[in-house]
Image (tube, rainbow, N blue to C red):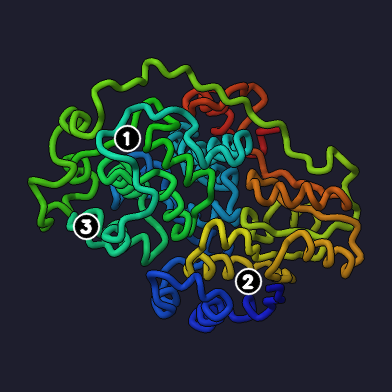
Amino acid sequence: MTAHLADVTSLAADRPALVARLAALFPESVRQQTVDAVARMEVRGGRRAALARLSGIDPVAYATSRNHVGGAVTRLSPWIRHGVLSIAEVRDHALERVRVPEDATKLVSELGWRDYWQQVYAALGPAIGRDIEPPAARRRGGLPLDAMPSDVLDAATGMACIDAFVRRLHDTGWLHNHERMWLASWLVHVRGVRWQAGADWFLEHLLDADPASNHLSWQWVAGTFSAKPYIFNRENLEAFTAGAHCGPCPVRGHCDVEGTYEDLAARLFASENPPSSRPSLRIAPAPPWRPGNGAPAPHRPLVWITLDAIAESGPAVAAYPAAPRVFVFDPAWFAAERPTLKRLAFIAECLAEVPGVEILHGDPISLLTERVRAHACDGIALADTPCQRVRGQAEALAASLPVAVAAWPPFCRRTGVRDLGRFSRYWSRVGESALMPTSRQA
């Protein structure tokens, strides 16, 4: 299907009407949640909502309470994922809220994880969907499951915590980072679900889902991109949820995560674990992305707004403020990520705040080529992205059109980075500069 979706943004002020329209356009996205439930969703897309949330962050409280499910987390990730806020902008705001830069260290380092995942994705491309390293520990039991178990999808496992996490994921599209880790760990190490199946499930539902942060985080939990697999026990869960789930749980005292970490490791993993035999992982950073081998930049480009930059503040729109703007709902993206209706509603609300954007559905290469001709443009401009699908499409476009890539505001100085094999090694190189405001990054 190729379609112009002009009415999507015009309906953004009326969320029930917007959601109903999206459900009619993309019926395959109506899963686990009714149209009415999506219409009542608390989080809204767009720059205004993002700035309102940004204004309330507290870096000091974040540092002391972020591991607690009820802690002072920012919940900015959906807007960061879609480029409505850049991580440099969030860092700058955090520095403005503290007495000395060191008070923002913990928040900035967590932004650093997102920056790191993006750099790894740019370097490895589609390989992030496969084990980056041999598993750090071998799980006991049979072959891993290739699909999500039905009792998990139905939130009917009998474990109060797991079922609560699943319901919240399906209902809201957001989970606290600790909840994500617990859910992923239980699925991979206890239920034996292949990490890729869990990662794909998250990618469907999370408002902030992108392949880099999502898949690489699952690999970190699974022990295929980390020194050891991540596991948790009931004591850990109770400590960081204030006992919200364990008290009334029907399997309290005999659940899957009872016992010490030593007990759990002995139950879950074979004794002949090979972590010491694994070679030290080295990943060389990718060079800056320049589609078309550095051809001259266009003078009158069409701005291609992608999922990584759905905002008027995005670098391509900012670089060419008078240029026409196009966003394309790509069928290949629908097939790969199977986004739910709540994800589409958030994206549509972000698009509604980009003045003059034209929204299309179909093959990006043919549609963008046609819109370049229609607007008498001489090329295309887009924000830098590690997304392999977008990069491939931009390379195809660059065979016949100049394609310019606009850089994001700098988050850190990466000139000395030679290895992305571990976050700790990366952060030792860039962490100091990441605590500097954007104005000092040059």
Looking at the image, do the residues carrying marks 2 and 3 touch, with CB atoms under 8 Å apart?
no
In the rendered image, the vertical position of residue 116 relative to residue 198, given as above or below: above
What's under tag 3, amino acid-wise?
A: Thr
Residue highlighted by disc 2: 352
Above or below, 55 against 267 in this view is below
* 157 left or right of 384 in image: left
Whether residues under marks 3 and 1 lie with C-beta atoms below 8 angstroms apart, the answer is: no
Disc 1/disc 2 C-alpha distance (Å): 40 Å
Q: Amino acid at mark 2?
A: Ala
Q: Nearer the viewer, mark 2 or mark 3?
A: 3
Check the image and report above or below for 20 versus 132.
below
Where's residue 401, x and y in %? 87, 52
Task: Identify the residue position indicated by label 3 in the image.
Answer: 157
Which is closer to the viewer, label 1 or label 2? 1
As rendered, which of 427 and 197 lies closer to the eye? 197
Q: Residues within 10 Å of mark 2 (few under 14, many from 20)?
A: many
Q: Secondary structure at mark 1?
A: loop
Local crowd at mark 3 within 10 Å, few (<14), some, or many (≥20)? some
Element marked by disc 3? loop
The Cα atoms of the two marked residues, 3 and 1, are separated by: 21 Å
- Mark drawn on residue 230: 1
Image position, residue 378 (x, y; %): 91, 57
Task: State left or right for residue 144 relative to residue 26.
Answer: left
N-terminal of the pair, mark 2 or mark 3, is 3
Quote the CA–CA distance across marks 2 and 3.
Answer: 39 Å
Please give left or right for residue 347 compared with residue 306 in the image: left
